[in-house]
Structures are given as structure tokens and as C-alpha cells.
Amino acid sequence: MAVNSTKKEMVRSWDIGGLAKLWEWCTNRQAGIFPYLLRKSNEGGGGDIDDPKPEYAGRWAGDAVYLIGDYDESGLYQQAKQSYKNIAKGLVAEYNRFIRSKDHQLTYDPLVEDEEDESAVEPGT
């Protein structure tokens, strides 16, 4: 899970079409959210964002940001899962407008979890 403890926001890899292990984050297109969220730019360079007021591009620049797994003992994963805002839906929409290439776009497919039912339903099942 990508976590911003400064803004109390998070993105689960499953929600953006990916898988969750570190190796999987490193080898898939979903990792593109990090340069997008962390960019710090006054623009003007080639390949920058056309959107005059992006909501997500650079949103996490300068913040305390972590990639954390459910096995971590710090408690941050559980805290984020329970009380942080999941920004995946809006991020995917804006990111895809920026990327344009269908081959590199993300899919928004939120993980469905029911607190009453301990079994989580993963996307595509």
C-alpha cells in the first residue's frame, strides 16, 4: 500500500490494477504513480502535465510517503487501511489523462472488503 502519513491518504495496488508485493510494485506500470504524485515542478519542460490545475500531480511532494505491507510491525498499514482516505479513483482518472497511451494506463478496480465477512474479494474474481 502506498501511504502518505502527512495527508492521511493511501492507494492500494489492487485498486489501480496491480499486485501488492514489493517485487510486483517494482515491475509493473502501477509504480508510475510515484513520480506522478511526488513530482515537484514549475512545469515548462517537455512531457509535463497539460492540466492547468491537476489535483494529484505533485500532491505528495515533500510529504512523508511510504510503501508498506500488511506484515510491517509499525502499525501504519492497519492505521491507513482503517482511517486514511483512499485516493485511487481520482488518481487513476487524472493519471490516465496524462499518460494517454492505452498500453500504460491504470485501471480502477477497487478491492471489495466487507467487515462482516472476513474474506476479501480480489478484483476479477
Image: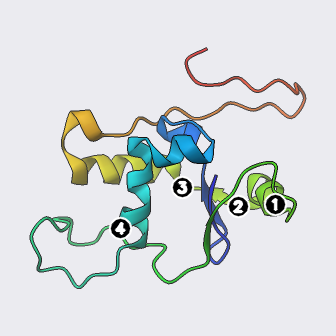
Mark 1 lies on residue: 79
Rounded to the nearest angstrom, the CA distance separating label 3 from label 1 is 16 Å
Q: Earlier along the polypeptide chain: callout 4 or callout 2? A: 4
SS assignment at label 4? loop
Please tell me the numbered disc located at residue 43: none
Rounded to the nearest angstrom, the CA distance separating label 4 from label 2 is 19 Å
For the residues bearing labels 1 and 4, Cβ distance under 8 angstroms: no
Amino acid tagged 1: Gln
For the residues bearing labels 3 and 1, Cβ distance under 8 angstroms: no
Q: Earlier along the polypeptide chain: callout 2 or callout 1? A: 1
Eye-nearest disc, 2 or 1: 1
Tell me if residue 60 can be seen.
Answer: yes
Q: Residues within 10 Å of mark 4 (few under 14, many from 20)?
A: many
Rounded to the nearest angstrom, the CA distance separating label 2 from label 1 is 7 Å
Nearest the viewer among 63 and 29 is 29
SS assignment at label 1? helix
SS assignment at label 2? loop
SS assignment at label 3? loop
Amino acid tagged 4: Ala
* Residue located 13% across and 64% down the image: 47
Amino acid tagged 2: Tyr
Mark 4 lies on residue: 57
Rounded to the nearest angstrom, the CA distance separating label 3 from label 4 is 12 Å
Name the quadrant containing residue 119: top right
Task: Give above or below for 85 relative to 115.
Answer: below
Mark 2 lies on residue: 84
Q: Earlier along the polypeptide chain: callout 1 or callout 4? A: 4
Mark 3 lies on residue: 87
Name the quadrant containing residue 59: bottom left
For the residues bearing labels 2 and 1, Cβ distance under 8 angstroms: yes
